[in-house]
Amino acid sequence: MKKILFVLTLILVAIATTAVYHLTQQADIFYYKGHDLFVKGKYQAATPLLLKSLSYDPKRKKTLTELGYSYLWAGNYQEAIKVFQESISLEPGNSRIKKSLASAYSWSKEYDKAEAIFQEVLRKDKNDRDAQKELAEIYMWDNKFDQSRAILTALLQNHPGDVRAKFLYGKVLLYSGQTKEARQIFQELLRHSKTAAKEDA
């Protein structure tokens, strides 16, 4: 009797192992097909393949991330938000995913939610320059020009060579009606760009 039970246990383990291997293999196959389209910028075509991969392995982090960006960059913001929320539930401390979720909120013009997430990220790491610039840009789109300008001013004091921050600062000035000052910044950036191009030639 013991031998029979032992053999049955071995058979069940073998079946379970084979099933898990099959699921993992299928998840891999569909992920890499979707990933190939994703890196080529074919986000809508990548989406069903990434979803198929997740049907075999729902908690695969890399697949969830690429699915979220596929939705985001294809303009399907609400689906992107859902996917990034799912990713955060798996990695609650991952600030990169939180910033992606905030970006999805900002693209769908849910500025308050985006601002809150970036502020949370900056409370944990006040030196996160990407979060600072993203938050400044959201403030700009939300017509909170003073708050945007304050962030960018402080950032540029510490990092005067940050081209994107300087460009954003010019945009804030432009959209808040300070056209002359904005033009000066854009001209400075243009001169810098031409100088860099000559040095690289």
Image (cartoon, rainbow, N blue to C red):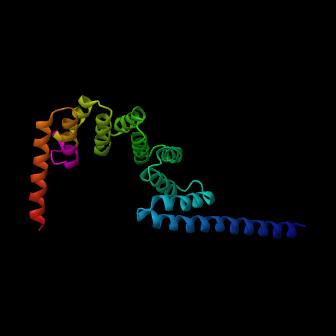
Say left or right for 110 vs 54. left
The picture places residue 200, in percent across and down from the top left corner, at 13, 66
In depth, the one of 15 and 149 nearer the eye is: 149
| Residue at the spot 73% in from the left edge and 69% down from the top edge | 14
**What's drawn in magenta, residue-wise?**
157-167
Relative depth, front residue between 135 and 78:
78
Quadrant of the frame with the N terminus: bottom right
Whole-percent x and y of residue 52?
59, 60
Q: Which residue is depicted at the point 16% across and 48% down?
A: 161
In the shown orientation, is residue 41 left or right of residue 136? right
Q: Can residue 164 be seen here?
A: yes
Q: For this view, does 180 lie left or right of residue 128?
A: left
Q: Which quadrant, please, contains the C terminus? A: bottom left
Residue nearer the viewer, 14 or 153: 153
**Is 69 drawn above or below residue 140 in the view shown?**
below
Most frequent secondary structure within the magenta stretch: helix
Task: Return the x and y of residue 15 as percentages of the image width and height.
Answer: 74, 68
Q: Is residue 127 visible?
A: no
**Which residue is rendered at x = 15% and y = 44% of the image?**
160
Which image quarter: residue 53? bottom right
Task: Give the residue at the far right of this rendering.
Answer: 1
Q: Judge whether residue 165 is colored magenta.
A: yes
The location of residue 196, given as percent across then percent down, is 12, 59
